[in-house]
Amino acid sequence: MKGKRVIAGILLVGIIAVILTGCKHTDSSKKETEKPVITLGSDSYPPYNYLNEDGVPTGIDVELDTEAFKRMGYQVDVVQINWEKKKELVESGEIDCIMGCFSMEGRLDDYRWAGPYIASRQVVAVNENSDIYKLSDLEGKNLAVQSTTKPEGIFLNRTDERIPKLGNLISLGHRELIYTFLGKGYVDAVAAHEESVVQYMKDYDASFRILEEPLMITGIGVAFAKEDDRGICEQMSQTLEEMRQDGTSLKIIEKYLDDPQKYLEVDDLGY
């Protein structure tokens, strides 16, 4: 009898422990779901933001921003948006902020910015057998860009004396289309973030050549509405800087890009 009582006691202790552990997990999950939600808007732009094989948003920006907002006490909802409507979406409050390798250059007065947290080169890419080797060789050529991106503005406005007059500038709604146009010879060149070009070549086994001379080097940031006075943007900027300093950003970026340290050299960008 005594032995049976001991066994019964041990079982009872075990059951209580399981119940308590379950309560802890339940409490933890409850606390997580009770956190306020920040809605991040982006289009598909690997390796910064894209859907993995399970249809879950992932990428450099997704990981960086999720970690930053977690430290700030928020949970994150990443939604795919029409990139051409990003400004009206954030101003209307449908999304809280814009992410996805978003260049700050030339847009400082359009949004309230957190960052820069990454430095990126805007570049021109051509087919391997192209006779284009420098920006001046683009004179009279046809070039494709994603619409409403920084390269579109660079070639439309031509405020940089290095930028020649093109034959045609073709603006397309989706990132992948510009590379399709280049591969099929519909255009002579494309312009985009260097990381985007490299990622496309990896994903589709394409062979493009990136011109050595960049269009520009820009800072990547998270954009909030200009009138957003909640203080979230300023807190986000501080948190992203803390992540850069404590090595978190480096660990995330190195999962996606070679030579990750160069992308964190943002101090001299002048913002």
Image: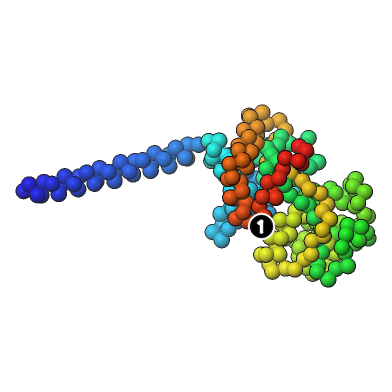
Residue 131 position (above or below residue 160) = below
Please state, as top left, top right, bottom left or bottom right, where the C terminus lies in the image: top right
The residue located at (58%, 50%) in the rendering is 251
The answer to whether 126 appears left or right of 4 in the picture is right
The 10 Å Cα crowd at callout 1, few under 14, some 14 to 19, many 20 or more, is: few
Asked if residue 223 can be seen in this view, the reply is: no
Q: Do we see residue 128 in this rendering?
A: yes
Task: Determine the image quadrant of residue 222.
Answer: top right
- Residue at x 72%, y 43% (from the top left corner): 266
Along the viewing direction, whichever of 256 and 82 lies nearer the viewer:
256
Pick whichever, 242 or 58, lies toward us: 242
As drawn, is 149 to the left or to the right of 80? right
Amino acid under disc 1: Asp
On the image, the x and y values in percent for residue 48 come to 65, 52
Residue bearing mark 1? 258
Measuring 19% from the left and 48% from the top, which residue is drawn there? 11
Residue 136, image quadrant: bottom right
